[in-house]
Image: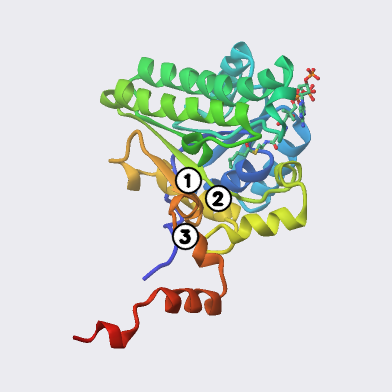
């Protein structure tokens, strides 16, 4: 039995990935192209776009990079016109572009708040609406996949604008799943836990010590790899997930659940500590015998 998707899983698809030149967006672009899709990636900086396009082409794939700031509605619309002119109708959208920084909320300026919320929430809405309008007008089916985060549900200290905007993305996903489902347009989201990527990780992880503490919180004791996220995204964009609509799939090695269970903290103690603790709690076997 094969342990991989069929090479043609995404053939005949034209997939747009926002923020596709770097990090998780780049990993998804490479994977989708390997699975047969034509991909168009966007971002503010042209250099990463060119590099990723060149890498995809080197592997025999098809890709275009078009610079676009997703915070601007007009630019987003022009981007989709250009993408379709170059590679035909877009069939799938991945809302991946994200802004974020760690900050004590009382120090965040209006500009700082805007930079994050406009990229994450407005950008995802503008792209989703631009795609949805085209699909509805042409009576075409389509799939939107948005990258949320586990703390969209739980909230998180020090990333409040990010948490607020990702929660909005989840609300958009669930709302439009109902509004557009009958037109054959599905919307799903993934909620990743920590996935180290160059750039974003450096900005969000202050020290190696904290990184190790974060790793210890995860039941599988490791971070996710971008390829694992790309595989999940491939499944969610393909017809294999055709009955999933309005879903948010958590991919975090169990981190979020483990943070909530009252006794889960014991799993981070040594075996000896746990054993002596359990022994201390156990009623004496002789006292149990009637
Ligand atoms: C406080 C900050 C700041 C910081 C920027 N600002 N960094 N405020 N703490 N660390 C403020 C600036 O002072 C300015 O406000 C405003 O934000 C805009 O900053 P600019 O540098 O002028 O512009 P811009 O590039 O538009 O925005 C900066 C940025 C963005 C928000 C940092 O470039 C960015 O996010 N880049 C990283 C992209 C990235 O790594 N994305 C992945 C995110 S990972 P003032 O008032 O001074 O003008 C993620 C994890 C979620 O989201 C989980 C999913 C897996």
Indicate the position of residue 22 as horizontal and vertical percent values: 69, 41
- Identify the residue shown where x is 62% and y is 34%: 41
The quadrant in which the N terminus is found is bottom left
- Identify the residue shown where x is 77% and y is 52%: 207
Question: For the residue labelled by badge 1, is the local secondary structure a helix, a strand or a loop?
Answer: helix
Left or right of 128: which side holds 24? right
* Residue 247 falls in image quadrant: top left
Position of residue 186 relative to residue 228, above or below, is above
Question: For the residue labelled by badge 3, is the local secondary structure a helix, a strand or a loop?
Answer: helix
Instruction: Please say whether residue 214 is visible from this viewpoint.
Output: yes
Question: For the residue labelled by badge 2, is the local secondary structure a helix, a strand or a loop?
Answer: helix
Nearer to us in this view, 182 or 203: 203
The quadrant in which the C terminus is found is bottom left
Query: Which residue position is annotated with label 3?
Result: 264
* Residue 263 falls in image quadrant: bottom left
Position of residue 57 relative to residue 208, above or below, is above
Q: Assess whether mark 2 and mark 1 are in contact (beta carbons under 8 angstroms).
A: yes
Left or right of 40: which side holds 201? right
Instruction: Please say whether residue 149 is visible from this viewpoint.
Output: no
Query: Which residue position is annotated with label 2?
Result: 31
Answer with mark 3 or mark 2, whichever residue precedes in sequence. Answer: 2
Nearer to us in this view, 251 or 74: 251
Q: Residue furthest left?
A: 290
Front label number (1 vs 3): 3
Q: Quadrant of ligand 1?
A: top right
Answer with mark 1 or mark 3, whichever residue precedes in sequence. Answer: 1
Position of residue 155 relative to residue 199, above or below, is above
Indicate the position of residue 87 as horizontal and vertical percent values: 55, 30
Left or right of 76: which side holds 53? right
Residue 233 shows which numbered tag? 1
Measured in 3D between alpha carbons, the distance from the residue under mark 1 to the one under mark 3, in whole angstroms, is: 29 Å
């Amino acid at each position: 039995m094969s342990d991989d998707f069929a090479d043609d899983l995404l053939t005949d698809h034209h997939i747009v990935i926002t923020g596709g030149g770097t990090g998780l967006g780049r990993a998804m672009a490479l994977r989708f192209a390997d699975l047969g899709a034509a991909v168009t990636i966007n971002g503010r900086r042209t250099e990463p776009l060119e590099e990723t396009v060149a890498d995809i082409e080197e592997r025999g794939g098809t890709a275009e990079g078009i610079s676009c700031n997703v915070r601007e509605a007009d630019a987003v619309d022009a981007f989709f016109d250009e993408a379709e002119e170059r590679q035909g109708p877009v069939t799938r959208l991945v809302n991946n572009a994200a802004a974020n920084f760690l900050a004590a909320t009382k120090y965040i300026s209006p500009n700082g708040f805007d930079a994050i919320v406009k990229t994450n929430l407005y950008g995802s809405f503008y792209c989703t609406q631009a795609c949805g309008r085209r699909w509805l007008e042409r009576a075409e089916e389509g799939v939107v996949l948005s990258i949320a985060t586990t703390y969209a549900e739980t909230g998180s200290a020090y990333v409040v604008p990010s948490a607020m905007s990702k929660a909005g993305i989840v609300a958009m996903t669930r709302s439009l799943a109902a509004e557009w489902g009958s037109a054959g347009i599905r919307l799903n989201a993934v909620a990743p836990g920590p996935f180290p990527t160059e750039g974003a990780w450096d900005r969000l992880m202050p020290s190696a010590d904290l990184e190790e503490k974060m790793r210890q919180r995860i039941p599988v004791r490791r971070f996710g790899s971008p390829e694992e996220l790309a595989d999940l995204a491939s499944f969610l964009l393909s017809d294999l997930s055709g009955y999933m609509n309005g879903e948010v799939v958590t991919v975090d090695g169990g981190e979020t659940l483990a943070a909530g269970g009252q006794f889960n903290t014991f799993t981070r103690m040594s075996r000896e500590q746990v054993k002596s603790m359990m022994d201390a709690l156990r009623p004496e076997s002789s006292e149990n015998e009637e």
